[in-house]
Amino acid sequence: MTLSLTLAFVWVIAANISAMIPSKDNYWTRAYFLIGVGVPLLGYVTYESGPVWGLIFLLAGASMLRWPVVYFGRWVKAKFVG
């Protein structure tokens, strides 16, 4: 297994553990940290392991961090559509 995939699996485990810990800010601080680490990691996974693994990691990250994705989609819709 490549280094990028190992780091991606560690990121997935860290995201799951951080979701289990109670938080007063509804996990947004941790979500910002996970996004900040996950975006460069996504590029590294795609570069080293190919676009299929990059897409798999993108879908895994989007499923775990779904609320930032939902709010971003609403912002794009409000900004450009309505």
Image (cartoon, rainbow, N blue to C red):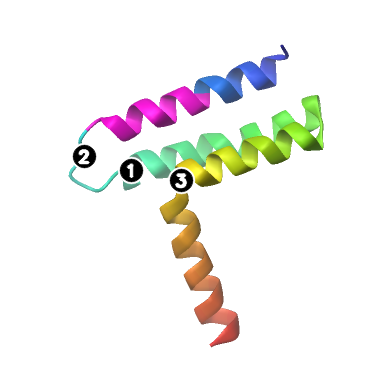
Which of the labelled discs sits on residue 68, or is there none?
none
Mark sitting on residue 29: 1
What is the three-letter code of the residue carrying label 3? Answer: Leu
Mark closer to the chain start, 2 or 3: 2
Q: Amino acid at mark 1?
A: Thr
Quarter of the image for the N terminus: give it: top right
From what the image shows, is residue 76 above or below residue 25? below
For disc 3, the marked residue is 65
Q: Secondary structure at mark 3?
A: loop
- Residue 4 occupies quadrant: top right
Q: Are marks 2 and 1 in contact (CB under 8 Å)?
A: yes
Disc 2 from disc 1: Cα separation: 9 Å
Q: Image check: 77 left or right of 2? A: left
Q: Which residues are magenta?
A: 11-21
Three-letter code for the amino acid on which mark 2 is drawn: Ser
x, y (%) of residue 41?
63, 32
Horizontal placement of 7 versus 64: left or right? right
- Residue 15 in percent (x, y) is at 42, 31
Residue at mark 2: 23
Give the image location of residue 45, x and y in percent. 71, 29
